[in-house]
Amino acid sequence: MRLTKISYTEYRGDPQEWVLDEMSFDDRNLLVGKNASGKSRILNVVAGLASQLNGSQLGLSGDYSCEFSSEFGTYLYQISFRELLVTYEHLTIDGVVKMTRNDLGEGQIFTQNLGENGRDLGFQSPPNSLAAVSRRDSIQHPFLEPLHKWAAGLRHFRFGTNLGKDAFSVFIPGGPKIDDRDQSQISGIFRNAERMYGTSFLDPLKADLARVGYSVTNVRLGPPVSLRVHIPQGGPTEVFSLAVTETGMSAVVDQHSMSQGMYRVLSLLIWFNYFQLNGIAACCVIDDIGEGLDFERSCNLIELLREKSVSHNIQLIMSTNDKNVMNGVPLKEWAILVRTGSRVHVRNYENSKEVFDQFRFTGLSNFSFFELDVINTPTSEKVDTPSSAGKA
């Protein structure tokens, strides 16, 4: 299942209204735009949709229209909600209505095992729950499963934050399970991956770190060596944190003393390698990718993630306003955000092919495409290509 298009309106008709015009997605995507153009907000919208389909939350007020491609066909899924209540929900597959409901929760859903070819069945859904969640049934309504698998496989990383660098772990027998959607629990994810896959997890992780520019001989969990952690009497016996041993060094660098850039890369690669092995991942959303990294490491990380997204069938949606990242991603994967007031319009290769193709012949860097605002420059003012420069 792949998200191929999305449009969204928040607080429709209110002073707080915010609109994302239709945006298309490919397998690999990079959102670029000036500060406050809507990059983070769009990624939050995508991640929020997954949370709603997981049944974990509903927004206060919003209208989604989403298109997905799957083995069942092309999905068009539309939902509206107000004040934590669903007011509209509609699903078609290849133009055929499979489910619809109103603001009272009354609706119809196609049921596989009724009659020879199946038929629509009336239902009453709770107003504060999506019918796609409350009516989930892999036997009667198998067409809902791809939506849930997509939502369950989405992971959202805010690369510009500390990603749980200041969070240490205590593992208690019989305690709560690790939530692999919680960025602060990366040490728990590492522990699970190491136990489940051993060197099949650790060796590729070290190789990936070396490729980015962090050569290490060991990655492990252990007590933080750079801190003296006081454990109250009667409490757990050990606190754990991630730690590495750099090549040529004997000292251990734990996550507290690790550079923010190194920790961000380590955290992200732990997640990628773990989910590559268990096959859960479907979509990886990364905000501010490359933030805090030097030029070489930023470029290496981008190249590595783009390769992994292809080899392991993971849809990759990233955002940046960093020059190094822009230069490392082909323009065909760009989505340039153009904000006018509270409305965001997206320009990409699909809807602005001629502009993108013409720029390829200028010999300028990808960042220049953004810096010179080529996408919004009138045709008569665009940068001359070598073949046209100097002509009357």
Image: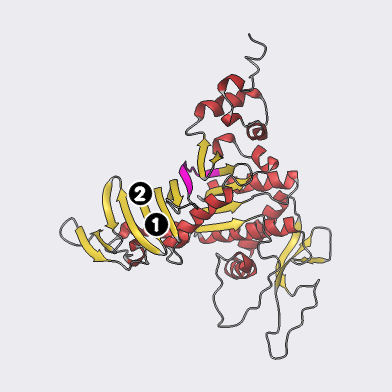
State which tag comes first along the sequence, 1 or 2: 2
Q: Amino acid at mark 1?
A: Leu
How has the structure been colored for display? Answer: secondary structure
Quadrant in the rendering for residue 216: bottom right
Q: Residue at x 15, y 57 (%)?
A: 116
Q: Amino acid at mark 2?
A: Tyr
**Circles 1, 2 touching at the beta carbon (< 8 Å):** yes
Residue denoted by label 1: 147
Quadrant in the rendering for residue 80: bottom left
Q: State which quarter of the image contains the C terminus.
A: top right
Is 242 on the left-hand or right-hand side of 122? right
Does residue 51 lie above or below 32 as drawn?
below
For mark 2, give the secondary structure: strand
Q: Magenta span covers which residues?
A: 18-29
Furthest-bottom residue in this view: 234
Residue 282 appears anywhere in the view: no
The Cα–Cα distance between marks 1 and 2, rounded to whole angstroms, is 9 Å
| Residue 201 rendering spot, x and y as whole percentages | 62, 62
